[in-house]
Amino acid sequence: MFRRLPDATGDTVAFTIDGKRAQAYASDTVAAALLWAGVDHCRTTPVSGAKRAPYCMMGVCFECLVTIDGVGNRQACLIPVRDGMRVETQRGARAIAEES
Amino acid sequence: MTETADVIVIGGGIHGCSTALHLAMRGIRATLLEKDYPGRHSSGVNAGGVRQLARHIAEVPISVFSMALWERITELVDDDCGFASQGQVLVAEGNQELDEFRKRVDELKLHGFTHEELIDRDELKRLVPAVADHCPGGIVSRRDGAADPFRTTQAFRRKAVSLGVQVHEGVMVAGLRRKGAVWCVETSAGTFEAPKIVNAAGAWADRIAAAVGDPVPLEVVAPMLMITGRVPHFIDPVVILRSRKLSFKQFANGTVMIGGGHLARAYRDENRSEIDWHKLADSAKTVWELFPVMRGATIVRAWAGIEARMPDDIPVIGPSASSEGVYHQFGFSAHGFQLGPGVGGLMAELVATGATNLPIAPFHIDRFAGSLDSRVS
Amino acid sequence: MIRDVEALPAQVDLAIVGAGPAGLAAAAMAASLGLSALMLDENPDVGGQIYRAIAANPVKDRALLGEDYWRGEALAKEAVSSSAQHAAGAVVWSVSPLETSGYEIGVSIAGRSRIIAAREVMLATGALERPFPIPGWTLPGVMSCGGAQTALKASGLVPGGRLVIAGCGPLLWLIASQYLNAGVSIEAILDTTPRTNWLSALPHLPAFLISPYLAKGLKLMLAVRQKVRVIAGIEAVRAEGTDKVEAVAYTKSGSERRIAVDTLLLHQGVVPNINLSNAIGCRHIWDDMQLTWKPETDSWGATSVAGITVAGDGAGIAGAEAAAERGRIAALGVAQRLGKIDVPARDRKAVAARTAHARFERGRLFLDAMYRPAKVFRIPQGDTIVCRCEEVTAERIRATVPLGATGPNQMKSFLRSGMGPCQGRLCGLTVAELIADVRGVPVREVGYYRLRPPIKPITLGELASMPKTEASEKTVVRV
């Protein structure tokens, strides 16, 4: 559970997480946006289905893997959040999406 | 200090370890010399295909013989080696290819081999639902499958050791010479002597062969493989598309291995290979076109083992052409893994009795006499 | 800023992987010497970890993050305004030698890949936090201190509920101080620094007393201790909860206590990020004081592989200021090798950087010794997860050593530890130390994972998006 410092400002963007609408700052990465949105886990593991959430926030732990706009296995902490982005929790061995 | 044995096996890949094990099973004292560790090279890092399918006709008898051992592998080495048999399928992409397949299956039947079965579009779709719709059929070898190559090589080594084989790892052969009735093998760890030697030295076997008077045009190759992260189960058998240079296998844990024969650059004296990403990009494009369901998969790792290829793409198995007491077992040209258990048994028989019932004439090293060029890198 | 693979130059003199302090300083220096330089960084902007979001920070109160942070501003400005290029969101997944000379670099930006060429490559990939494998460390709500600090720096986010910080090392005090400045309340700091570290740190005290770190560190620590309950002498820590962390249990003087938490932050030092230098084949050595592998480098940052240099924390932990100086020195080395300056000019120009570097090195040995993490927190037991990606536990690893898994590479083949997407970044050190512990041999004997590219997973689509070449039609084996 994370809160925003009162004097941290920025332009806001709207995105969805598992279909639910949420907001973030344009300067946030998807992982930061998820932390602020209060999402308690962003994926379940392919081995045991255990719930995982961002850990290192710098691209080395691969815990923050989510599906963004239909493409899976994206490291949320390395991707800036964009207006209209569709973020989905990645469940287990991700269903491989078709790419156009 | 000199160590003596009945047989010295040079090379601790699947072939060396299998031969050493089978020698020990016959009560013959064997010493195995391995310059790195068993499974370090192609034996430990190949695609693990346990395949009778699509082999050169000369290899079929030994492949069928080896398959029988695979089906009892736990009895043989006290480890199931991760062997699972879901079949292997060779996919035809067009009618012309399917016609060639039909001819092949007929020819095999003429020789008495029934492991390959021609299949039509419906059966292909049933076996490989994810394959693209334009493929008219193929060949299936239902008893084929795959195993864990490193685990298998280590299992053979472990069982061999338990039966008394002396395995020396990190030991490089520096020279060989004849001393009366025995061979003296000079190494980085001292001298080893035995009346008989088996040259199972993989991508380095040409050097051993040259040292005993059998120069051969061996080419060092490094076939590349890629493996993906876990994806939901979508394929059972191993799938091969020969014309597209693609092979495909999904493991029980969901990861998918993609191979097919594109080569990396190999540096055998540095135990190193450099992946060629442009060629892997081609494999990726092929997968993209033929298996749309794979499009979002991630490649987690790419590698290439160092392997030996012979100009005619079949191995060298049999006695030396020029030196007494020396036997060759190398050059499996990127398809030797499945043959390991069987050829080890065959080689032990040959070394022990001087003969084998299996037809190994096509693999004799003398087929290269006079054809040596300097293709050895 | 390059944000598209199409805009990448096909060839540069010097490709720099990482735009943190070392990369930024190297880029500016290389550009000033007439080299074409390209920084490739996977983050949305320059700064690396320590100067994250330096170019556009949402946190307005400068005092909150501390003056050390803002030093990065000048560094970033100099690099970005030089002729050096910067590719953002650029993941380097492969660096391999061309057949004659120079290197091929596999890069992905926004789902598409390219291979570009460089005459030399500098790895400035910095450090990552040492793994901290306690029971329950994979629970949502448990994060690394560095991760939390990134959320603060780049997004102005702080933990909102009950917070405990556990571990040892200067970052603990820094983040606690930053949080206090931001009005965040901290339930407790569980200090896992082994009490006996003082003894081995003592010989290095004189150097520390005259180092730049003393005054800063002391001030921070005292300020924090005044406001937060600090519990020292921690013997064990455990994160408890079902779907997320609900409490942290700790043992001190043999008895266990529990604190309810919503967030648990862990930290026990940083270690060089060696995945790329390892995959390239550089020789690495085990540093028993810093308890980590680092690439072998000479005084110009050159590794055992010609044309590959390492600068910054990736060559050995020494902090941001030292990293910038090492970046400058390494760039001078590259410029000399590529013929832009001669040896005397190179040596002359390096004097200022070497002097500054020596100053920033002073006192590091004291910090290394003082904050050397305890064995119990590096080498776990029982069902504590060691490999997070593949969920391999400590007891399974211990039990597999006698089966022939004598090193991390064999262990990989047996248990898949290290085969997940993080490529051993969060488990490699633990696995190596665990195996060494079971075998009773030094860690250097046990070795490390032999890594291969891609050093980060790439999608089939990325790979397939590479432009076709004719060379790929030739030679295929019949497998």
Image: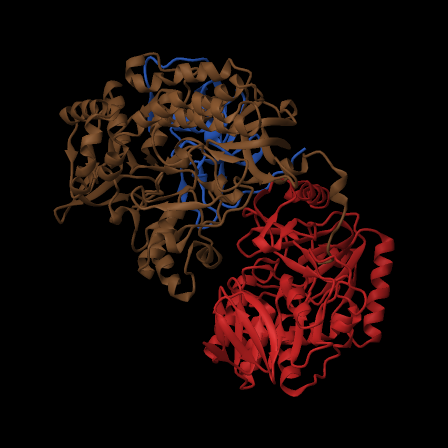
Please, is residue C105 above or below residue C403 in the view?
above
Q: Number of numbered discs present?
A: 0
Chain B appears in which tint?
red
* Colour seen for chain C: brown
Image location of residue C399, percent across then percent down: 36, 62
Q: How is the image coloured?
A: by chain
Does residue B348 appear left or right of residue C393 in this picture?
Answer: right
Any idea which chain is the blue one in this picture? A
- Residue B84, image x, y percentages: 59, 65
Residue C55 visible: yes
On the picture, is A56 further left or further right than B268?
A: left
Residue lying at 51% horizontally and 63% vertically, measured from the top left? B37
Residue pictured at 72% horizontal, 77% vertical? B322
Q: Nearer the viewer, residue C6 or A28?
A: C6
Residue at image coords 39%, 38%: C272
**Front residue of C59 and C139:** C59
Quadrant where the N terminus of chain A is found in the figure: top left
Most foreground residue, C476 or A78:
C476
Residue at screen point 42% across, 34% down: C299
- Quadrant position of the C terminus of chain A in the picture: top right
**Can the viewer see residue B143 in this picture?**
no
Q: Is residue A63 above or below residue B309?
A: above
Residue A76 % position (x, y): 48, 31
